[in-house]
Image: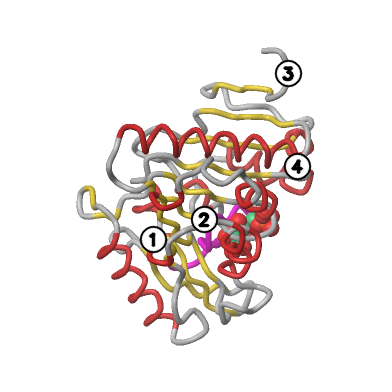
Amino acid sequence: MSDAIHVCSDPEALAQHACEWLVARIGDHLQQSEQPFVLALSGGSTPKRLYQLLGDLTPGTVDWSRVCLVWGDERPVAPDHVDSNFRLVRENLLDHIEIPATNVLPVAGADGDPAQAASDYAQLLNDRLPKVNGLPQLDCALLGLGDDVHTASLFPHSAAISEETRCFVENYVDKLGCWRLSLTAPILNAAGAVVFLIAGEKKRQALQALWFADRNPQLYPAHLIRPRSGHLWTMVDQSAVDGVEFPNDSQVRRIGELN
Ligand code: 6PG
């Protein structure tokens, strides 16, 4: 299911569009609300350019003092490890903007006991974020899509797929042979908006499964993502959708073309 599908010509155009979209979304929110804009960041390689573009914005374009950054998932490594999603954001975004340290909520202890790290982060989200129906409220969650249709660190046949109450959990991933730490479907589906950022021809089959396979979250965890707000964006580059049909119930926009 996808409400809005934005198709960009290539990964750079995708990052530019996502940056413009996010700047506008944050600005609209801050005009209408006293609450900070809570943005959940995704890991992996796709969002790196987006983070760089956000970091390169003219100071003042985004009032980072009113934005709260949380992590959608984290790997079981120290924050300075090359695989760390915190390091990805620090190097490409945090080191380039003025944002109060209290607005940056990384997953502490990710390289330690996974259950403790998950419990501590869930508590932090509950303590720091506004809650709706008992769940910490995200204004926007950025998500990637794995070739196996995982998202965040919700991997096929992993226990976290079935999580119905906790907002952030430890999740053992057999195919990786390690623990991961991840937001869960309940908190993601309670978000004001969810944005999938997907690029590359390798994602074509995963997108087809996301959009057209019979609903099967154990096999295709991204099937779990159905924001109750109804605001789901799937931003892709052309190579990810070459030869791919689009769901009938979505609005497709080709970004950069005269619409
Ligand atoms: C992670 C991510 C993960 C990622 C997908 C897509 O920590 O790896 O959160 O869910 O978004 O695996 O990764 P790419 O953007 O590298 O294709």
Q: Where residue 250 appears, x then y in whole percent? A: 54, 24
Q: Residue placed at 29% from the left, 57% from the top?
A: 129
Please name whichever residue, 209 or 237, is drawn nearer the observer in this view of the structure: 237
Image mark for residue 41:
2
**Which amino acid does the dot numbered 1 rest on?**
Ser
User: Residue at label 3?
Assistant: 257
**Which amino acid does the dot numbered 3 rest on?**
Glu
Q: Which SS type dominates the magenta stretch?
A: loop
Q: Secondary structure at mark 1?
A: helix
Q: Where residue 252 appears, x then y in whole percent? A: 61, 22
Give the mark nearer the N terminus: 2 vs 4. Answer: 4
Image mark for residue 11:
4
**Which amino acid does the dot numbered 4 rest on?**
Pro
Give the mark nearer the N terminus: 4 vs 3. Answer: 4
Q: CA distance from mark 1 to mark 4?
A: 33 Å
User: Residue at label 1?
Assistant: 162
| Residue 135, image quadrant | bottom left
Q: Please give the range of residues in magenta.
A: 146-160
Q: CA distance from mark 1 to mark 3?
A: 41 Å
- Quadrant where the image shows the C terminus: top right
Q: Secondary structure at mark 3?
A: loop
Q: Quick check: marks 2 and 1 in contact, CB under 8 Å?
A: no
Q: Where residue 78 appears, x then y in whole percent? A: 57, 82
Q: Secondary structure at mark 2?
A: strand
Q: How many residues crowd mark 3 within 10 Å: few (<14), some (14–19), many (20+)?
A: few
Q: Nearer the viewer, mark 1 or mark 3?
A: 3
Determine if the C-beta at disc 2 is less than 8 A from ligand 1: no
Q: Residue placed at 27% from the left, 42% from the top?
A: 34
Q: Secondary structure at mark 4?
A: helix
